[in-house]
Structure formats: C-alpha cells, structure tokens
Amino acid sequence: MQPLHVQLFDLTLIQLTNWRWSWRASVIVSVIAPVFMIVVLSVFAGDDNPEVLGYVLTGNMVLTLLMEGVNKVSGHFMFIRTNGTLDYFASLPVYRISIILATVGAFLVLSLPAVIATLAIGTAILGLPLNINPMIIVVVPLISISLSGLGAIIGLLARNPAETSSFGLLISMFLFGFGPVLYPVDRFPEIISTLSLLSPATYAASALRQVVLGMPDRIPLTVDIAVLAGIAVVLLWVVNSRIEWRGR
C-alpha cells in the first residue's frame, strides 16, 4: 500500500472533483440561510448590545458549518453507501480510515468559502469589529471535523436518502437551537443551559466567539478545543467501526 499521507491526498482530490461543477452553488445555498437570519435579527431584534450581536454572528457561522458538516456529509455517505462507491473503495489497496479522513477533509475545504462569506457579510451587516485569534486555524477545522463525523454516522445508519435528509436536518436544527449558540446563556432556563453542555454546537459557538470576536465566555477556549477534539476522535472511531470493509 501507499503511505497514508499519499492515500489521503489522492482520495481527497477524488472527493473534491465530485464537486468541481457545483461547489459555487453549494456555497451560495449554505450562505443564504445564515445571512437571511442575520438580516432578520439585525432588523427586528432591536438589540444593539455587541454581546448579543456577537452571538448572532458566530451562531450563524455554526449554522453554516452544521449545514455543510451534518447535512451534506450525511447525504454523501448515504450516496456512496447505497451506490456501491464504498464497496469500490474497499476493493482498492487503501486504508479504511483514509477514505473517512479524505471525505471529512474534502468537506472541510468545501465549507471554508461559505464560512468566510458568512463571516464577512455578517460583520458588514452587524457592524461588529473583528478580533481574530490565530487559534481560529485550529477551531474551524475541529468544528467541521466533529460535525462531519456526526453527519457520516447519520449517513451510515439511515435506511434511505429520505431518512438521511430528515434526520440530518432535524439534528442540525436541534443543535442550532439548543442552548447558547444564537443567544446568550442567560436567556435560557437553567436546565437548558446545563444540558447544552452535551451539545457539540455549544462548544463550537463558544470557541468561535473567542477566536473571531475576542469575547469572553463561560467555557475557556482550551476546554472548547479539547471537547471538540474528543468529539471528533470518538465520532470518527464510530464511523470507522461501522463501515464494512473487505468482507467485514
């Protein structure tokens, strides 16, 4: 077999070429909903509190990553599972983890234009000053990978494309609305604030607020990064164990 890094490079290119004609439309679709929500909230919320506006901006960045990571990855894994693509890859001299990491990496690359567009447009609409922390280059990939792992599990466990789409959308909206993603934690009942610590979106939003706007948060950035990394590792391990590979 070729070395792992060679497999990853080749397989990532293969995954990206599947989107070479449609990535522009994909970016537009992934940006429309978050930007629309930013516009609506900026017009009707009537809240000039920079903290609240910061939640609106970074919360919608999380929504963009949810749409890319959960919805699209779940649909992609359902497609390659039901159309024999996984069986084809299993017949090649490549590691199972290579195809998983390559797929996750490809969707990370595809999500970056949408995330950057949401950040740029949202900042312009809300008039927020940016305070970019260099750790953003760690945070965004970790968020994307952890959410892509969740999407991959949905795509592997769902019975058909309709079920995949429904579960992906349901879970995305639940994670987006459950806890301090779009609004500050003090606007939620205490039970919701506590249970939200079980959601990866909570740590994603917390980390983005700190690395994009420099906002203080109840969860330290190091904890956000550690939790997101742990979630990513666990979910990718589950995906690796669920994929049938060479007769397994």
Image: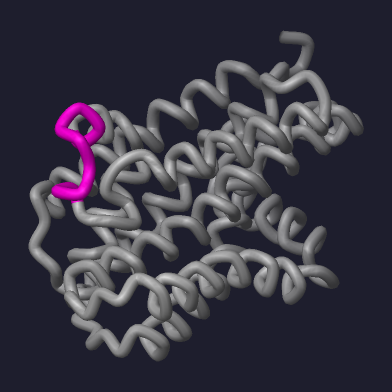
Q: Residue at x 54, y 58 (%)?
A: 108
Q: Quadrant of residue 244?
A: top right
Q: Position of residue 28 (x, y in %)?
A: 68, 74
Q: Quadrant of residue 163?
A: top right
Q: Residue at x 34, y 57 (%)?
A: 182
Quadrant occupied by the C terminus? top right
Q: Position of residue 208 (x, y in %)?
A: 28, 62
In terms of secondary structure, what is the magenta stretch mainly?
Answer: helix
Q: Position of residue 19 (x, y in %)?
A: 78, 63
Q: Position of residue 243 (x, y in %)?
A: 67, 21
Check if residue 72 falls in the magenta segment. Answer: no
Between 97 and 126, the one lying in front of the other is 126
Q: Is residue 150 above or below residue 41?
A: above
Between 94 and 210, the one lying in front of the other is 210
Q: What's the magenta region?
A: 185-193
Q: Quadrant of residue 234?
A: top left
Question: Would residue 116 be found to the left or right of residue 93 on screen?
Answer: left
